[in-house]
Image (cartoon, helix red, strand yellow):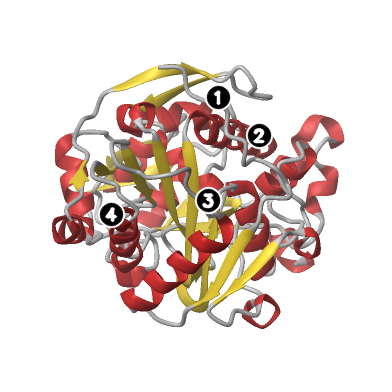
Amino acid sequence: MEKRKNRSLSPDEPVAIACIRDYDEDKIYSALSRADEALGIFEGTLSGKKVVVKPNLVAKRSPDEAATAHPAVVGTVIRWLRDRGADDITVAESPGGVYNKARLHGIYTATGMAEIAEKYGAKLNYDCAYAETAAPDGARCRLFDLIQPILDADVVVDVCKLKTHALTGMSAAVKNMFGSVPGIVKFEMHSRFPDYGDFAEMLVDLCELIADRSEFVSVTDGIVAMEGNGPTAGTPVPLGALLVSKNPFVSDSASSYLIGREGKVPTVNIASQRMFAPAEFASLNTVAIEGADAESLASVLAVPDSVEKNGIERIRNLFGGRIYDMFRPYPVMDLSVCVGCGECAASCPRHTITMVPKAEAGPAAKRAKAHRVPVIDRDGCIRCFCCQELCPHGAVRIRKNPITRVLS
C-alpha cells in the first residue's frame, strides 16, 4: 500500500507541553486529551487502523532507572488510543543486541511493558521480521532496514524518554526511532556512519521516513528525565514535563531547551537546517497544558562525560583529524565492576573489543573478579559508546585526554 506523505513536518506545527510531577495515570490522560483537543492529532477515528506504540526500551532496565519510557505513560497512551477508537494496538521495539523473541520477552518484562499491555489490551510484538525500505528523500542515508510492525503501521506513536546521550547529546523523539532498525543492524549503522555529524544526519533521515509513511505523534516522557551518562548509565532527575506533537523534530527542539541544550543537539540543528523545526524555543508554536510554564520547567541537566565542554570540536579537521582524535573522549573498562558477560564485545560495531583471559589483560586486570575480561583496541574504536549504552553492569567509563580534562 502506498503510504501518504505526512503533512505535519512543518516548523509551524505546535508542541503541547504539560507540567506533570509524578506518574499519575489520570493526570497523564488529562494532559494527552487536552493536547489532542488543542493539536487535532488524529484524522478521524482510529478504528480499523494498525496502531504501533514505539516506546524507548533501550535495555532490560527497571522503570525507576529512567532509561526507558515509563509504563504509566505507555499504558495511558494505550488507554487514550483505545478511547479514540483504536482496536488494533501493538507495542513494538527493537532494543540493542540480538533481535529475537527471547530478548524481547526479557525487555518487555523488565521494563513493565508486559504488565501494562495486558492491563490495557495491547499486543506485544514478537515478529522479528524486517525489510529494506527506500528513503528517497534521505540526505545521508536512502535505504533502511525497518522492523515489520513499523512497516505495517497506519499510525505510529513514538513514546520516548527524555535523556542526555553520550553519542547524540540528547535522546528523545528522533533518536527513539532508531529502535525501528532491527537489533544488530544498528551496529552496522554505527559502523557505516562513525562520524557524529553523519550519524545525526542518518537519524534525521530515518525519522523523516517513518513520519512520512503514517500518521505520527510523539509523546515525550520527561516527567523523570535522565542526566549525565545517558542513555542508560545516567542519573534520574525530576523534570516534570510531558510533550506531545505530530512533529518529532519540533518536539525535540522544545526538549533541547528544557534540558539546557538548546543549539547543542546535532539532530535538532540538522532538522532546523532542513526546515522541519525552529532551532530556538522562542520560535516554536507551543501550547501550555496543565498549567505548564516552560521557562520554569527548564533545567540544565548534567551532560555525558563524552560531551566536550572546551571547544575541542574546533580542531576537528586540523591535520586530517589526527589531533582531534588524540583529544576525543574514549571508553575504558572498569574491571573491578565487570563480570565478564561479553555484552560489550557483542555490541561493538567495529569488533574492537575482545574477551581475553584475565592473566592476558595486563596489570589493570589484577582487580578483576571475572576470569575473562574485555580489552579495547583503541586504534579501531569509533567512540560510538555502544559498549557503555548496553553494558548491564555499568562497567564502561569515559576517559578524557589529561590536557582536555585540564581545559574543561
**Which percent across, then down, holds residue 267?**
66, 45
Q: Which mark is residue 142?
A: none
Left or right of 37? Residue 312 is right
Query: From the viewer's perspective, is the residue at label 2 or at label 3 nearer?
Result: 3
Judged from the image, the secondary structure of the residue bearing numbered disc 3 is: helix
> Which residue type does callout 3 highlight?
Ala
Crowd band around label 3 with a 10 angstrom C-alpha radius: few (<14), some (14–19), many (20+): many
Say whether residue 82 is visible: yes
Crowd band around label 2 with a 10 angstrom C-alpha radius: few (<14), some (14–19), many (20+): many
Judged from the image, the secondary structure of the residue bearing numbered disc 1 is: helix
The residue carrying mark 4 is 82
Q: For the residues marked 1 and 4, what is the alpha-carbon distance in whole angstroms?
A: 40 Å
The residue carrying mark 1 is 192
Residue sitting at x 20%, y 49% = 122
**Which percent across, then down, holds residue 204?**
61, 37
The residue carrying mark 2 is 201
Q: Earlier in the sequence, mark 2 or mark 3?
A: 3
Q: For the residues marked 3 and 4, what is the alpha-carbon distance in whole angstroms?
A: 22 Å
> Which residue type does callout 2 highlight?
Glu
> Which residue type does callout 4 highlight?
Arg
